[in-house]
Amino acid sequence: MSVVIAIVVFCVIIVLHELGHFFAAKLCGIYVKEFALGMGPVLFKKKGKETTYALRAIPIGGFCSFESDLDEEYDSEGNIVPTEPNPRAYNRKPVWQRILVILAGPVMNLILGYIVVVISLCSSSVIASTTIAEFRDQSVSSSALMVDDEILSVDGTTIFSISDVTYKLQNSDRRNSSGNLVFDIEVKRNGEKLLLKDVEFMTMERSDGSTGVYFDFKVYRLEKNFGNIVTEAFRECASTARLIFMTLIDLIRGKYGLNALSGPIGVGTVLAEAVSKYTFADLMYIISLITINVGVFNLVPIPSLDGGKLIFLLIEAIRRKPVKPQIEGMIHFVGFALLMLVMVIALFNDISRLFTGG
């Protein structure tokens, strides 16, 4: 059942992404030739009024195929056959409409992520604020922080939610002469903003033998009402989206190696474990993380992704003419090949972890 739920979650995330493209294209009058779930060989297909709906063999995504009259047609003797411009072709539509179609997919994922976060907050026992309520035993940060301090930023990063505080405190190795971790924390105290330099936190040994920061304070709980849930859901989504961008930047900078990548198998394993071991609220949080990840990653300006296509549309809007289709097609092909290489590496990592238990 855990595996089935994981597969269903993947399918819902992919289908909603492609439905965003699909409905936006229909709204703009674009002819959609195929709506596909998966890649590779066709397992099943059904012809609708004008669109073919297909299920393909490789479950790593999906796509919408739009009509284009840029492709040249040839007769039996190899001569180019003149074709009339098709007003419903994707390339014939105004740039703003094509931008709308491209953005609709990631936006659907972000909307889904927000809805799932709302469900998670509604089902969770508490909603945590970013304001300090009390300090734990053996607290050292209390020498600088005070009860009722609202945490605004940590080491220059604006804090949207308690998740941001957790991430920033867990991902630093700046220490003082005593060996304690130190952070520059901006707080709001009695209505005024204060920047506290080198706030100390002790480390503690985790269950796996590693060491991490000791969270030596607790925060206030927010009243669970409509306003707080709506507001905190926006904060959590903003926090998650920024975290994904930060992780991508760290990956490019070399902070994380390629062996840290996970593919569908690894993510599915985490989902399956969440179904069987964690609370419903935790499961919803993980699902929101995945769908927001899909939405944000697709907006990264990498060729073949929605973000890469958006860049070409913006260039066309500025130049008042499109990039040559052959050039754009070649760039997207190279981008797609590189993404497939990354996917193979991620799948290899997933399989290795299954056998090694990592």
Image (spheres, rainbow, N blue to C red):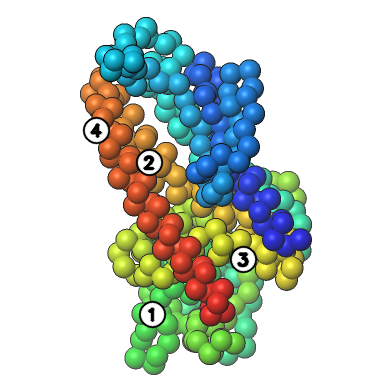
Cα separation between marks 4 and 1: 45 Å
Query: Looking at the rendered structure, which numbered label has been put on residue 173?
Result: 1
The amino acid on which the numbered mark 2 sits, given as a three-letter code, is Ser
Q: Residues within 10 Å of mark 4 (few under 14, many from 20)?
A: few
First reached walking from the N terminus: tag 3 or tag 2: 3
Res 42 seen here: yes
Residue 351 horizontal/vertical position (percent): 52, 69
Q: Are marks 4 and 1 in contact (CB under 8 Å)?
A: no
Left/right placement of residue 32 relative to residue 232 reads left
Q: Which residue is mark 2?
A: 304
Cα separation between marks 1 and 2: 37 Å
Q: Which residue is mark 4?
A: 327
Determine the residue positioned at 53% across, 80% down.
Answer: 356
Along the line of sight, the residue nearer the viewer: 164 or 270: 270
Cα separation between marks 1 and 3: 30 Å
Res 283 seen here: no
Quadrant of residue 163 in the image? bottom right
